[in-house]
Image (cartoon, grey):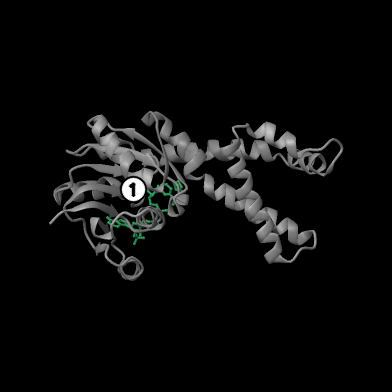
Amino acid sequence: MSVRLLLVGGGRMGEALLGGMLAAGRPPEELAVAEVYAPTRARLAEQYPGVRIVEAPIAAEGVVLATKPDGIADAAEACVAAGAQRLLSVAAGVTTDAIGTAVPVVRAMPNTPALVGAGVTAIAAGSSATEADLDWAEDVLKAVGVVVRVKESQLDAVTGVSGSGPAYVFLVAEALSDAGVLAGLPRELANTLAFQTLLGSSQLLVQSGDGPAELRAAVTSPGGTTAAGTRELERGGVRSAFLEAVMAATERSKELGRA
Ligand SMILES: NC(=O)C1=CN([C@@H]2O[C@H](COP(=O)(O)OP(=O)(O)OC[C@H]3O[C@@H](n4cnc5c(N)ncnc54)[C@H](OP(=O)(O)O)[C@@H]3O)[C@@H](O)[C@H]2O)C=CC1
Ligand SMILES: O=C(O)[C@@H]1CCC=N1
């Protein structure tokens, strides 16, 4: 009997999508995970009761491919041979043409906040995918966050900004907390202050309708503490470091597609 949705690859991204979909109320019996690594299968089976955990692809109405980029084409072929009707690849860099199966392929770039329903995913249709295939992909992914539709040519840049983006934000969180400790605060308190500041600032950014420059200006009192701190960030080249980071990640995504 075919499952509604098979996730191939129960690694970090596969599990973020699985956990996010279950938390959003998707029934576990609609889902299956194919994962080659036995200890990961055992852990997933224990952590997600009701979800079918298998070693190799089984028949499915739809498949999310979340293996490493260099294994995506083979995994896609195995899924089609097992009876998959449509595919959704989340692999960085790998084009839908390179996947090139007999069934429609949608390419997506999600991010790990999907695990808590706060992801953002960009999707693009491969040449044989229709509007209905994009609707299906959007339906699957909107359970775990915001979904936007883009041209496939934009997906490498999307990867640089939001696919890899959570890692940059976690780095900022670590650095802000470390700085609090340097300034004399206990670690637990520094973590609470740093993490809640990131959360609150993101919520304000999304909910207020004001842009980041306006919101930053509202924190920056004339001759005050924020202006003094911001001068040091600018002196350290933080803005340029973000530009270079996103460009490097975008380029690496393109390289992964050529490998
Ligand atoms: N992590 C992230 O934030 C994001 C990742 N992605 C994409 O998601 C994909 C997975 O990345 P990530 O989760 O980080 O990597 P992981 O290495 O954590 O996960 C990949 C998993 O797939 C397993 N696997 C490999 N081949 C197969 C196969 N043929 N059938 C079933 N399972 C298989 C791997 O097992 P083993 O280790 O034994 O090989 C591993 O458990 C990549 O293509 C990446 O580009 C996209 C957006 C964000
Ligand atoms: O680091 C990576 O290659 C993957 C793709 C985007 C986030 N993680």
Quadrant of the picture in which ligand 1 is shown: bottom left
What residue appears at the point 16 percent right and 53 percent down from the top-left corner? Answer: 59
Where on the picture, by quarter, is residue 183?
Answer: bottom right
Asked where in the image residue 11 lies, by quadrant, the reply is: bottom left
Across and down, in percent, residue 192 comes to 66, 60
Q: Residue at x 58, y 52 (%)?
A: 170
Q: Quadrant of the C terminus?
A: top left
In the figure, 113 relative to 217: above or below? below
Q: Amino acid at mark 1?
A: Asp
Q: Which residue is mark 1?
A: 70
Could you tell me if residue 124 is visible in this image?
Answer: yes
Helix, strand or loop status at disc 1: helix
Q: Residues within 10 Å of mark 1 (few under 14, many from 20)?
A: some
- Where is residue 94? Give x, y as percent: 35, 40
Q: Is residue 58 left or right of residue 120?
A: left
Whether residue 94 is visible here, answered yes or no, is: no
Q: Is residue 194 left or right of residue 228?
A: left
| Whole-percent x, y for residue 121 in the image | 42, 41
Give me the residue at 84% from left, 35% from top: 222
Q: Nearer the viewer, residue 214 or 180?
A: 214
| Image: 40 above or below 166 | below
